Amino acid sequence: MYRHGLVVGKFYPPHAGHHHLIRVAAAACERVTVVVAPSSRESIPLAVRLDWLREVHADTDGVRVAGVIDDHPIDYADPEVWDAHCAVFQSVLDADVDAVFSSEAYGEELARRFGAQHVAVDPRRAAAPVSGTAVRMDPVAYWDMLAPPVRAWFTRRIVVVGAESTGTTTLSRALAAALRDRGGVWSATGWVPEYGRELTERKLAALRTRDPEATVFDVTWDRDDFVEVAEAQNAAEDAAARTGSPILVCDTDSWATAIWEERYLGSTSPAVRAAARRPALYLLTDDKDVPFEDDGLRDGEHLRTWMNERFRSELRTRGLPFVEVSGAPEARLAVALSACDELIRQGWSLADPLVPPSRTDQEKELANSPSCSRTSPTR
């Protein structure tokens, strides 16, 4: 049993291999410090990675997660660079370490510099065949290696919006079902319903306890109602993203709530605007040639064209990504599936981390240095 173990990494992003490493260290130590040390150029904020690791290892006894930005170059052959990195790691330690746990080749030297024992953990990646580089290149292929909060961050959120009775629920349900039918990782594709409709049902039911003849036209709305809708929609979306596939389909969202608030109250409140997010894509359902179906909860047939124009105008003004769908349900679904496939094809575009210089880079640097003679013979 070691007194104090050390695990160092970028965790860009954290994956099953990282979690295995931390748990092995925790089982062998009285306490473990996990140092998350990314460079500032990377795309996932340090604070987010710390939150992820603390959540996943909340029940791993003796684990402390600390973070620090490390923008020093990577060069395993340069003792001064080693000193700089070790000073960064040391800055967030609260006691000496007597064991360094690592799956990387540099682990032996890192342990030596801390005067600690090196413990190699699964260097061949047999227990968890994954790496941060592999995940960044293709999160879909390694989806099962990601913890729920990491999945939520990577999930592409597709939001279907439109006026009443323009097919938003029909399309969003069909899209989620079609993705699930693809099987594999896609079988867990989630669908988030419209919370505003649920709240309307509750309001109408409450009215009918006092007046059995009440209709949806008797339902009233205030600012707090729309704040509740926006916050509940966000919460439901976030919960679904943790357990679903790389795409989450949503029947409206908190941004669309602002348009509905404007429709009922004449303007949008700062609280509702502040709740808005930016999903990967909006699908706007056209109202043309779609008959209005009164299901007892709809009251805006006369406003359908105005509502859709507001959605279209706001999407364009704010530069939000959207695709407009029209025609028969089959045609709409085909367009929506094609848009989803294009999003996945585009990938996630995460910035590369700092990496060791290649031999070619080192030779170029040497050739361009002032001390290098331009006429020296080729070696």
Image: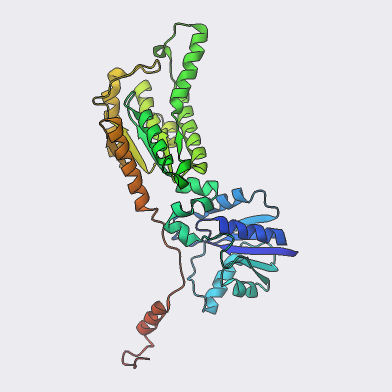
Left or right of 239 in this view: 218: left
At x 44% / y 44%, what residue is drawn? 183
At x 56% / y 72%, what residue is drawn? 105
Residue 78: x, y in percent? 52, 78
Compared to residue 121, the image places residue 162 above or below, namely above
Residue 327: x, y in percent? 25, 31
Let me know if residue 2 appears in the view.
Answer: yes
Farthest right residue?
A: 1
Residue toward you, 329 or 78: 329
**Visual colour scheme:** rainbow
Residue toward you, 280 or 371: 280
Left or right of 340 in this view: 6: right
Compared to residue 217, the image places residue 11 above or below, namely below
Residue toward you, 123 or 321: 123
At x 49% / y 14%, what residue is drawn? 205
Q: Quarter-wise, where is residue 37 in the image?
A: bottom right
Task: Tell me the quadrant of the picture where the C terminus can be found.
Answer: bottom left
Residue 346: x, y in percent? 34, 52
Compared to residue 12, the image places residue 184 above or below, namely above
Residue 136: x, y in percent? 44, 57
Q: Quarter-wise, where is residue 366 in the image?
A: bottom left
Let me know if residue 67 appears in the view.
Answer: no
Left or right of 316 in this view: 257: right
Q: Quarter-wise, where is residue 293 in the image?
A: top left
Left or right of 154 in this view: 17: right
Compared to residue 45, the image places residue 207 above or below, namely above
